[in-house]
Image (spheres, grey):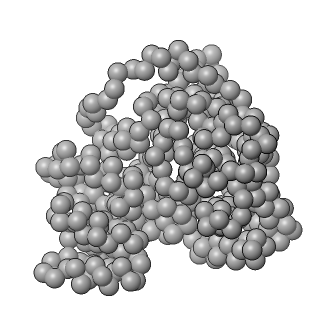
Amino acid sequence: MKKKIAILGSTGSIGKTLLDIISKDSKNFEIILLTADKNYKLLYKQAKNFNVKNLIITNTKKYNLLIKNNKKKDLNIYNDFKNLNRIFKSKVDYSMSSITGINGLEPTFNIIKYSKKIAIANKESIICGWNLINKELRKNKTEFIPVDSEHFSIWYGLQNLKIKNIENIYLTASGGPFSNISLNKFKNIKINQALKHPNWKMGKKISIDSATMINKVYEVIEARNIFNISYKKIKILIHPKSYIHAILKFDNGLTNIIAHDTTMRIPIFNTLYSNHGKKLKSKNMDINSLNKLDLKIVELKRFPMVKLLNFLPSKQSLFETVVVSANDTLVELFLNDKIKFIDIQKRLFKIINKKKFLKYKKKYPKKIQDIVELNNYVRLKTLKNSI
């Protein structure tokens, strides 16, 4: 019997990689739903290539163009996620949530009840809304697997082991494009320099987050939430080659080191085929990388964003949404050449230390709308204080 699949964000890099994996084994899968925001041409092409009948495209202008493209009227095309109950008559076997940003939070939450297993790549769902997501997962008995290479590696390394026996988790960071440049050059960093990640091909937003290293702060928050472990037990190490993705130090003296090539294909493949014994052809073990791991402690003068970890409350709160929303806005301003690279960090710390935002350390989200409304509020205030 074919496995039924839903992909939220099918036109992004993770969605496209997943579809490529499925294309090699298409006889065993039936895709029920594909979604996108603006790329209606690629979405339409994917629908035709994989014989998908249900599409959601959230941008109204692109939705109207897609409707016009559907001359045969053979596709069910929707403009939002309110029609999931019309699309799913029963649970699908696997859903991938790879919509980027806060906009991916509500669709991720809503598709859980229609999924037997969900792979979540949407950081905001785990950072800002984990208490709500996790409750929904338990309520619907939906299996969850993280997609980020670091969190997937931790999840994989903990198979048949207990989190309570962890002494420390080490997440690795490449250091991005600025791991070696002189500190006095940071004030003149250009957009094209910040986008040149040495190891990964990523979208503009996440490339900038990698360059400032706030993405690694996010991953620490995600690890805290997913694995219910104290911040004190989670460390960051610089690892320029990005071959090691996580190191697990146990209280019995043993250490697990999880390594794989710098490709998201490996974690995506394994979320799809977990417990099915399916083989993935990959490169031989990189002995040179293992012999030259070059692990280092984070240099805080170079990556001051890591100091954010000292500002975070020990338990999940709405303050994480403040951090994410303010940073998203500042990154957009930098990409639009409105502020300098070093201003992202400087202005972020100034904003989150305002009294009106610090109060959110003691508040937690009770519903998805709490996060959405706070995101809109923080973005407006950040813009007001940055232009």
Q: Nearer the viewer, residue 48 or 138?
A: 48
Answer whether residue 111 is visible to the viewer in this image.
Answer: yes
Q: Residue at x 27, y 46 (%)?
A: 21
Q: How many marks?
A: 0
Compared across the picture, whether 229 is left or right of 274 comes to: right
Q: Residue at x 70, y 41 (%)?
A: 230
> Residue farthest to the right?
355
Q: Is residue 188 above or below residue 247?
A: below
Q: Residue at x 63, y 37 (%)?
A: 175
Percent across and percent down for residue 315 are 72, 53
Q: To which quarter of the image does residue 335 belong?
A: bottom right
Q: Residue at x 57, y 53 (%)?
A: 192
Q: Is residue 99 above or below residue 190?
A: below
Q: Is residue 24 above or below residue 370?
A: above
Percent across and percent down for residue 146 are 47, 47
Q: To which quarter of the image does residue 48 belong?
A: bottom left
Q: Nearer the viewer, residue 141 or 328?
A: 328
